[in-house]
Amino acid sequence: MSSDTPPARRRVILKLSGEALRESGSRDNISPEIVERIANEVKAAVETGRVELGVVVGGGNFWRGASASARGMDRATADYVGMLATVMNALALQGALEHKGVPCVVQSAIEMKNVAETFIRRKAARHLSEGRVVIFAAGTGSPFFSTDTTAALRASEMGADQVLKATMVDGVYDSDPKKNPQAKRFERVSFQECIAKRFQVMDSTAFSLCMDNHIPIVIFDLTKPGNVTSALLGEPIGTVVDAEE
Ligand code: UDP
């Protein structure tokens, strides 16, 4: 490689849970201040020119299909409500990014022409290679899936190098750190172990899809300032989930 050749850009999918956009204890589902903080961190990473970024947003700050179904609602209908919830989060994030001058599009898996582009794989890939952030809304477009699985799916379709799962804990533990003060955090753990031991940090469909498509997952704490930027730039952080050696 000549010294003039720019380093290859990483292509990553950032998974933001809906809960991450809510201020704890607040009645508001979306905190504009938190969304702005995330947008600032995304901007800092994107402006280095070293990363192509797709974002999958969850909807759990508004609604979760499985919980509504447990209370008697038809599961598929409840899941469609959940997918629509993700669109609200996607629009909030898009607004904050655009306000900061970060080029950004929302692509929705459920057609919603007035507010978002419809998800088209080749078009999304083109946005990424041209430096626009793509926010993937409405999950996979199908009920019975999660937005974690959506992140694994979009990462596979986009040929991403990593899935970055931003969450409220700083990695994968061998037991629940809230219940067991002796719980040990892994720096690295295999897909196989996550699936076999049913670690709750992501669902098994998401783990399997990433495992089959050789896409490592980084699980990190979103609440610590600077972490989103660090994760996007590939700095060591949280727990890496990848294949067994
Ligand atoms: N959902 C779905 N299909 C998908 C993605 C999401 O039906 O492909 C629904 C499901 O009801 C889910 C809700 O959307 O509970 C919100 O997504 P998720 O629970 O993954 O959000 P998060 O926990 O990340 O905030």
Image (cartoon, rainbow, N blue to C red):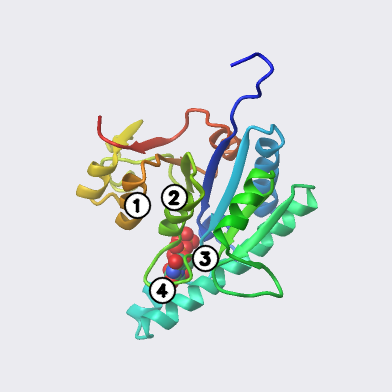
Q: State which tag comes first along the sequence, 3 or 2.
A: 3
Q: Tell me, for residue 143, which label it has, or none.
A: 4
Q: Residue under circle 3?
A: 59
Q: Specify the quadrant that holds the N terminus.
A: top right
How far apart marks 3 and 4 lie (CA) works out to 13 Å
Q: Are marks 3 and 2 in contact (CB under 8 Å)?
A: no
Q: Residue under circle 2?
A: 156
How far apart marks 3 and 2 lie (CA) works out to 21 Å
Amino acid carrying mark 1 in the image: Leu
Residue 239 position within the rendered picture, expressed as x and y whole percent measured from the top left: 39, 36
Amino acid carrying mark 3 in the image: Gly
Number of other residues with Cα within 10 Å of mark 4, as a class: few under 14, some 14 to 19, many 20 or more: some
How far apart marks 2 and 4 lie (CA) works out to 19 Å
Amino acid carrying mark 4 in the image: Pro
Number of numbered discs present? Answer: 4
Q: Residue under circle 1?
A: 209
How far apart marks 2 and 1 lie (CA) works out to 8 Å
Q: Residue at x 44, y 50 (%)?
A: 156
